[in-house]
Image (spheres, rainbow, N blue to C red):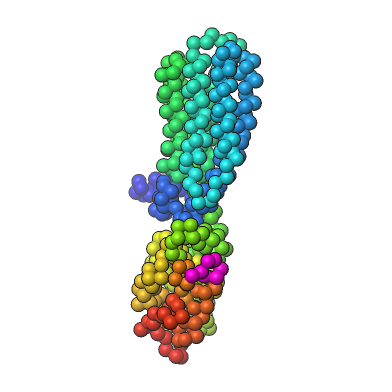
Amino acid sequence: MPFAVILTKQLEWLLGATELSGERLRSLISRSAHTAYFTRYRRILINQRIRVISALFALLTLAWIPLDLLLLPSDSALVISGLRILSALTFLFLALNHPPAHEPCQLRLLILFLTPLVFYLLAIQQLQGLELLGWSAVLVQVYSLLPFIVIIGVTIFPLTLLESLGLAVLPILSMLLSPLVADPGQFQFIAKAWLLFLMFGVTLLATSIQLNFMLSLLHRISYDPLTGVLSRSTVNELIDLYFHLALDQQAPFALAFVDLDRFKSINDQYGHEMGDEALRSAARTLNQHFRRSDMVIRWGGEEFLVIFPNTDLDGARLVLERLTHDWLGLRPDGQPLTASIGVAEKLTDGVSDWPQLLELADQRMYQAKQTGRAKVVLGPTDEINSPQTLSPET
């Protein structure tokens, strides 16, 4: 068995993946491979966890002040207490701030993990040279564990490999910088640094497992098992997200309803298995013709909805003209599998809410079906007629 295959199987076992495709691997490495739909859900989850962890950190940071005042020399205790108050205020800001779903969360993550590390470096500098015994010495040892607490905290989030590397390297850098502000002793430093590097590897694995699980779960919930395209359960959130982005940016936004022509005759004459294959063929062809940013949704039965973010009517027309050249594959009798398509676009149609846009595209799809099928209706008098048509008896 080739080494690459063995390595892939081991990665699948580690990540809990039944099949580690190239696309899934890219999604685990970088967020640039994520769909906008998945990005939105992941961002909401990460921001929720940031708020909860920040609130917990704020409470624990403030609750530790009495111990500092009790066990440390008064001058050092006052300085460290001031640092704790500043840290707690930062955590409270993260906990109380509720960002919108479209706002990136990477900066908030960076602040969350940088705050305790900056506190760690300033605190050990303040404690440098103090002769402490008993519980005071124990307290100082607890401060030296902050980089380990931070690197463990990274594992709570479903992060890509690049994101995990960027965050998990921060505790290592703080550990490497610690000898510049305080002398930890050579043996003690080497032992802690080695343990931190081991935890670094575990952190990368843990965040990847979380991300893979989230990708798998959302795919199972959001995608139609027969055709492999998005299911209707995702429609409201997707359209709402992209329509409001288009409103904010004053950008175009188009929808297309695609209804397969005389699909019932396939089921009646050739059976439901051939009908299912026709649906899969149509879904594959639609995905092949559209851009990565466009989304194909199985609306129900033989109907599909296509979302064209940041696309005006001319852009949608260009794509659909190519689609009508060969249509969506072949019917069992060898004729082209055609469709009746209705298109609506936010700016051209002067629509201010997406339900109205959806209704307009649906009406134009029925207009295409009632006026001969195998065509695209883009407006009251705007059509794309295809030379590929069905014979009357089909």
Q: Within the magenta stretch, is there residue 384?
A: no
Residue 203 percent location from the top left of the image: 48, 36
Residue 234 percent location from the top left of the image: 55, 62
Q: Nearer the viewer, residue 280 or 101?
A: 101
- The residue stretch that appears in magenta: 350-357
Identify the residue shown where x is 54% and y is 66%.
353
Identify the residue shown where x is 57% and y is 45%.
98
Q: Is residue 355 above or below residue 332?
A: above
Say how many tags the image has: 0
Does residue 104 appear to the left or right of 290 in the view shown? right
Q: Is residue 311 above or below residue 23?
A: below
Q: Is residue 124 above or below residue 255?
A: above
Residue 268 percent location from the top left of the image: 53, 83
Identify the residue shown where x is 48% and y is 37%.
110
Identify the residue shown where x is 46% and y is 80%.
380
Evaluate whether residue 385 shows in this view. yes
Evaluate whether residue 54 shows in this view. no
Residue 148 percent location from the top left of the image: 51, 28
The outermost residue toward the bottom is 393
Does residue 266 appear to the left or right of 290 in the view shown? right
